[in-house]
Image (spheres, helix red, strand yellow):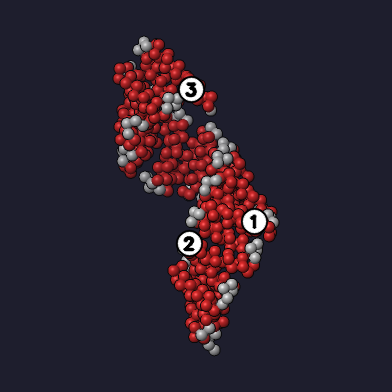
Amino acid sequence: MSKTWDDYVQAGAHAFEAGNFSEAENFMHAALMEAETLGSELKTALSLDNLAEVFFEQGKYDQAEPLYLRSLTIRQRMLEPDHEDIVASLNNLSALYFFQEKHEDAEALCRQLTSIYENVLGPEHPEVATSLNNLALLLKAQRKYGEAEQVFKRSLLIMDNAFGRNHPDVGLNLNHLADLYHEQHKYADAELLYEQALASLESSLGAENPELSTTLNSLIDVLKAQGKEHAAAPFYQQLLSIKEIHLGPTHPDVMTSIDSMAAFHYQQGKYEDAEKLYKRILTIKERSLGKQNPLVVGSISNLAMVYQAQHKFAQSEALYKEALAICEKSFPPEHAEVLNALQNIATMYQKNGRYAKAEPFWHRLKSMRDKQCGANSPESALCLYNLAVASFQQGRYKESEPLWRQLLKTKQELLGPDHPDVATCLHHIAETLRFDKQYDSAEPLYQKSLAIRQKSLGPNHPEVASSLEGYANLLQLTYREAEAEHMKNCAMSIKKTKAKAS
């Protein structure tokens, strides 16, 4: 028995719901051909809509558009202007234009829809509010912020009057208006509305509903943008709890949230809280991936960073070494992960004043950076700087001097002659010469370093104080005590001003 139009439509709908789009396309196309054979224009319009929906769902917008347009044309010719099928066509086409980013075309259709809803349902109907919300989203996409704000507010007022503040649609509208303010960097306004949206959604959906996640993330963002990170702690925790409940404790999204929360605690100086969370992530990864898997290196390094901040140097050193060993075993010698692990352990030693321990890692890293990026690259310059500092801090001044001179040349080429980094090199060269009693050679370098720092950093910068102190030491050694005393007093004044400000 041959299939009827209804059979094709029903089979196409089943295939569509199952995600079998190729099969759905075939059935919907067969339904269209059957409707055209029957000469039923309204069935043809519906078939066009159905086939267009299959294309739309696959992101084949260019194939969907002419079908939606033809369906709308048929319905406008045969039906009353406010008919529900015309409304459906306008909605379909408006959504298509939105996803195609044809916002002006979508806006015109959305205004037409809003007018129909107002005429049929009355201006205070919730369906009008939904249409207004869609219109406001289109205006926002075109950066017509002033008009979008007014339309969002009108939509919110209708929804609020119809349902009350503790309704999910009201919470959604509050969130959209907050997004508008957020996009314009009106963070205080956005914060207030996100908080209202969160309260509305919590009341209507529950505090652990995954629908809250977007609002929580946005609220965290606006708090951070205002420098109010400390206020974000409960929202990080709520977001994590939601994900744990709905995704399970070891889901990748849960791991991402734990990592974000650990980073938040670290930035706030709550190292014990950060340590617990990083340990939790590391334990989960090691159980699922194995302790030698390179995917655990990031978590090992994060935990090492927290130990370093807590002055637990033995634990930090052991973890950085472990991370490096895994990278060396898993990757080629000059792989980015190996370089990163080398830099982590070298930096750890350097910050702790263990310069002899740091040096071989900086040497190895510099050799790799020279090969990959060039000897005059910023990456190599960083290694050279740390090598110069390491030898200087260990009192090997003669060895340090050529490193500072090499770095000076690189910095001048990269940054120009008047950059603060150039002044730093000049200052340290002057220091090495002073320690070597080459006072005449050191003095002009102190003077040049001081001049650059005063000009580029301002007269009250701590590095200016450092230059003044170094130059004062030289003046004292060359029996110019009055000038030395004056410079020391100036340096002391800068330090006192800095201390008061902090």
Amino acid at the residue labelled 1? Leu
Q: Which residue is painted at 42% across and 15% down in the image?
A: 486
* Residue 59 rendering spot, x and y as whole percentages: 47, 66
**For the residues carrying marks 2 and 3, which lies nearer the camera in this image?**
2
Q: Is residue 324 left or right of residue 366?
A: right
Query: Residue 122, relative to residue 386: is it above or below?
Result: below
User: Circles 1 and 3: CB distance less than 8 Å?
Assistant: no
Q: In whole angstroms, how far apart are the C-alphas of marks 1 and 3?
A: 57 Å
User: Circles 2 and 3: CB distance less than 8 Å?
Assistant: no
User: Is label 2 in a helix, a strand or a loop?
Assistant: helix
First in sequence, mark 2 or 3: give its number: 2
Near mark 2 (Cα within 10 A), the count class, few <14, some 14-19 or many ≥20, is: some
Question: Can residue 11 be spotted in the picture?
Answer: no
Q: In whole angstroms, how far apart are the C-alphas of marks 2 and 1?
A: 25 Å
Asked whether 445 or 62 is in front, the reply is 62
- Quadrant in the rendering for residue 18: bottom right
Residue tagged by mark 1? 157
Near mark 3 (Cα within 10 A), the count class, few <14, some 14-19 or many ≥20, is: some
Amino acid at the residue labelled 3? Lys
Amino acid at the residue labelled 2? Glu
User: Is label 1 in a helix, a strand or a loop?
Assistant: helix
The disc at residue 104 is 2
